[in-house]
Structure formats: structure tokens, C-alpha cells
Amino acid sequence: MAAWVQLKGVDLRYGAVQALRAVDLRIAPGERLALIGANGSGKSTLLRVLHGLLRPSAGSVLRDGTLRQAMVFQRPFALRLSAQANVALGLWLRGMPWRQARQEALPALERVGLGARALRNARTLSGGELQRLALARAWALRPHVLLLDEPTSALDPHAKREVERLMEEFAADGTTLVFASHNLGQVKRLASRVVYLQEGRVLADLPVAAFFDGPLGQTSREAELFVKGELG
């Protein structure tokens, strides 16, 4: 199967800190790939490399020439503008005329249940609404690949369910998802494949059923201990 993105031997260093080590990763269309591991394992760094925000110190990142991608960050930022303008800005920055961008922003807001909040100052939205606004900004770009960094970590249970529902719907529409998560229940619900990172290395890369139900210790003892809660 063709790959949207492929990493080959990727290292990334911040000064004396080696954040990623010889990472090989291939992401195919339609996958739902979860990145898991303890804090500092390299999940967020890997997402930023995938999105092109960080340049590897070594190795290569290959992308399909037609690829469109978007990223949703753990703590989404909103300008002191309306929700509609916040979504429209992303489209305008991609070259769309401002009037058209404002029009295109409305169905994106409707898609995430924020149509009634279109003219509201985005800074007044709740945490869950802000995360859905970030999803609307991403969805408006019609990405092939959607990258998400801990998309529900700071949300209450209701808001988490809403964001998960939207992620499931985007995946059902054919969007490839790559998301970092500490929530193993969420990974079981949403992922088709799991990558376990430790100290910047990929120690396990398995289908979700094999990761949680198979003899994981034969692949990575560290990943097995992490899943059991014995390695944090």
C-alpha cells in the first residue's frame, strides 16, 4: 500500500538531548495510528517532525506529493477574534480569498457542533469548545492526514467523548489519524495501530489487537510494563 509519509532513520537532537533515535515509520492512507509512551518519550517531537515543524538532525522524511495535512495541538491557541474568523484565517493563510474563507469556515464549525458559536469571541469558549474549534480549523483544510497531540488530555469526560466522536467520524470519512495519547482506553477505542516510544526509540509497532492482547513481552518488555502501569 502507498504511504502518505515515511520516516527513514530519523534522529533529532536538541543540543545535548537526543529526542528521536533512528526512527523508521511508514504511515499509509486510512490508518489510525496511536503514539504512546511516557512523558519525554518523543511523541510530541515525532508529531512535529511528521508535520514538518522540526527538521531531523539525520535521516529523511518522505511525503506523498499530493499530501495535505493539519495538526491539532494539546493546548489549542485562539486569537481574540470570532470562532468563524479563527477558522477562516487558516484558509486565508493557505491562499483562499478572505470572503470565501469566511464562508468556508461556517460548514467546518457546523461539522464540529459550533455553528451557533460562529460569531462568538473564541477566547470565551470552554476548553472542550476550543478543542472542537481546533478540529474545525483542521477539518476546513480537508487534510489527508490529521495529526493530534494529546487531543483530550485536559478535557472533562463529556468533552472527551465529543472529541473522540469527531475523530471517529473523520476517520470514517477516510482521514488518516496520527495521535499521541496517554489514555490507553482511548487508544483501544480509536487506533488501528500502536507505536510505543521510549527515549526517542520505537520499541513496538503493532496492530492494536496484537499490542494489547498478544504476547507483547516478546516484542518489547518495556512496552509490556508500560501497558501494565509498571513503567511511567
Image (spheres, rainbow, N blue to C red):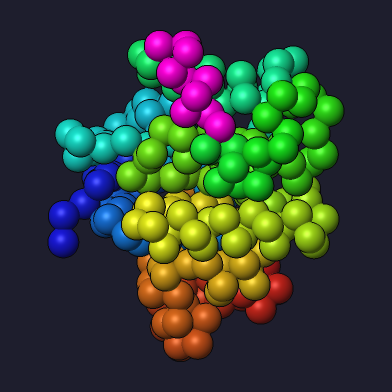
Q: Residue at x 74, y 41 (%)?
A: 129
Residue at x 50% of width, y 24% of height: 103
Left or right relative to 4: residue 80: right
Q: Nearer the viewer, residue 180 or 105?
A: 105
Task: Name the residue located 27 percent from the left edge and 45 percent from the top edge.
Answer: 5
Q: Is residue 69 left or right of residue 9?
A: right
Image location of residue 10, percent across then percent down: 32, 40
Q: Nearer the viewer, residue 89 or 180?
A: 89
- The answer to which image quadrant residue 83 occupies is top right
Q: Is residue 222 above or below residue 104?
A: below
Q: Where does the image place residue 121, in percent across and percent down from the top left?
A: 77, 22
Where is residue 145 drawn, in percent x and y? 37, 45
Answer above or below: position of 158 versus 14: below
Vertical placement of residue 23 versus 211, above or below: above
Residue 224 is inside the magenta segment: no
Would residue 74 be seen by someone viewing this image from the given angle? no
Image quadrant for the N terminus? bottom left
Residue at left offset 59%, top offset 42%: 110
Name the residue nearer the viewer: 116 or 85.
Answer: 116
Q: Magenta span has 104?
A: yes
Residue 67 visible: yes
Q: Quadrant of the C terminus?
A: bottom right
* Magenta residues, start to end: 97-106
